[in-house]
Image: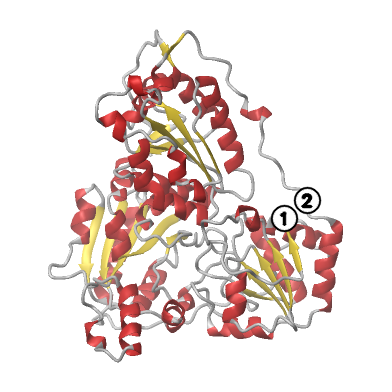
Amino acid sequence: MRDDLDRPVPSEITDLFGSDAIAEMLRRLGAPYVALNPGSSFRGLHDSLVNYLGNRDPQILLCLHEEHAVAIAHGWAKVTGTPLAVILHANVGLMHASMAVYNAWCDRVPMMIFGATGPVDAAKRRPWIDWIHTSRDQGAIIRPYIKWDDQPASLEASLSSMLRSSVITQTAPKAPTYVCFDVTVQEERIVEIPALPAPERHVAPRMAEISESDVREVLTMLEASQKPIFLMGRMSRDQGDWDRRVALAEHFGARVVTDIKTAAAFPTRHPLHIGTPGYFVSRDAAQAIAEADLIIGFDWVDLGGTMKQSAVDVARAKVVNISLDCLLTNGWSLDHQAFSPSDLSLLADPDAAVRAMCAAVGLAENAKGQMSILSPEPAEHRAEAMISIDSLADTLAEELSNVAASYLRLTLSWSGSKCDFRGPLDYLGYDGGAGIGSGPGMAVGSALALRGSGKVPVAVLGDGDFLMGATAIWTAAHHRIPMLVVVANNRSYFNDEVHQERVAIDRDRPVENKHVGQAISEPDIDIAAIARAQGATAFGPVETIGALRATLIEAISAAQSGQTVVVDARVKPGYNHDMAEGMTNN
């Protein structure tokens, strides 16, 4: 990102306002960026970010839609585990962003969301606009799927709430927080910046260490087990944590299952990894889970549903659930999933539990796995052949074989057999709430967080996902964020075609009609033109393997040189069996 980008003209500050103190507090909270779409409810704060802070620390990430602002912060948190700041305009901006907030909640990522309302004092409201942009309890719009919110009524209270929101969002289990500022508080004159709460004196609480007795209980179960299996879910991006997971599994000969909803947690081609990562459990993984005599879930998403799908005999198999997730269970959102049986449930960070178990069995702090990682079978595709999702995966992997790449996102149609993840940043997972339209914004945020990592950020998005969130690409182009987006364009909302096919079969109606109201064609949408219009380098449409291979060579090179790149790859519709079965089974 260019250092001279969006540098404001220097200004001499003579008078101070409440928003100047709010901006200074935001700087002290340490978020390097604040993502926003402008709005009059925080015009005072916007001025302070630009003219009081000089648009640095934090720097504004201008977004073309509020949903993108939240998605960008979500993508950032998936890489770093730390919160960005987001500002949303009044009730209308908050409603625009609500789906993205729900995604972040379901994905358990930290994020400081700030908002504003029109004057709480009705006598100070402008006619019409301030009335429709003022809500009596604005946080109620998203309260069921955030961790904490506040609508403070004074400057001092606003500063305190900002600090509290930062601490709460970074306390495990992590999730977004929201603070709504009164526009009057922002725009009131102040004599001086008040004493600001000190973040260094209000650190996030540490989780209690997992006890020795709890560790011993789990290890006793492992030592007695003949067929243990680890279900590795929401784990950290730390390389040391990754290495310890591998070492622990090898020490006990435990088979490992991962999924594609969450980020890479274990080498997918390790001899102990069973089945293929998916949105639903693969047949091989389900069989291994059913055969296990000990199942340990490490913050696994939907442990109960996975056991049900795998037909686990709970009378025979012991179950250990290591997670903090129950602390966020509420009555509105059902993202807590099916209620899972467990013989031992530990409130602990999953990687902290792995670390404690490794130490207890004598594995070194820097322990690494010893087994060889298998190599994928080379794939052959004719140059003149039309592109399928599998041949897209193979061709992309081939062209990235000598490149350190990070898959930021993969489509619903992606086959787990094509996943070759060997490190914690190789894949960052889905969006939590399965809200279509989140992909572009999250990819931008993750790509921004990966700057300087040596990784080429690559997102493979569906056409529906891309089109709903396409204007997030402008933010990447404007801020010079290098990334490669490959749109697997099947010209359809194909997930719903699969559902319509299931319904037609069940009702003995024509399957041939499944595309009606689903196909994105006649006219086709020029995805490359949409990307190019926003300043991205764009290619396509490409329709054959040979054209895709040539295009990817050029596109990867462009991303490596610092460009935001989009490729429109026309693919044949299709899902792998496990995905189609999991999505449509009653």
Residue linked to disc 2:
209
Compared across the picture, whether 186 is left or right of 112 comes to left
Q: Residue at x 34, y 17 (%)?
A: 10
Give the residue drawn at x 78%, y 83%. 226
Percent position of residue 248, x then y: 73, 67
Q: Disc 1 and disc 2: Cα gap in Å? A: 8 Å
Q: Is residue 362 visible?
A: no
State the residue lying farthest toward the bottom: 508
Q: Amino acid at mark 1?
A: Ala
Q: Is residue 417 above or below residue 421?
A: below
Residue 524 — which label?
A: none
Q: Residue at label 1? A: 352
- Mark 1 and 2 residues: CB-CB less than 8 Å, in contact? yes
Compared with 107, 72 (above or below) is above
Quadrant (top left/top right/bottom left/bottom right) for the N terminus: top left
Q: Which one is in front, 318 or 369?
A: 318
Q: Secondary structure at mark 1?
A: helix
The answer to which image quadrant residue 90 occupies is top left
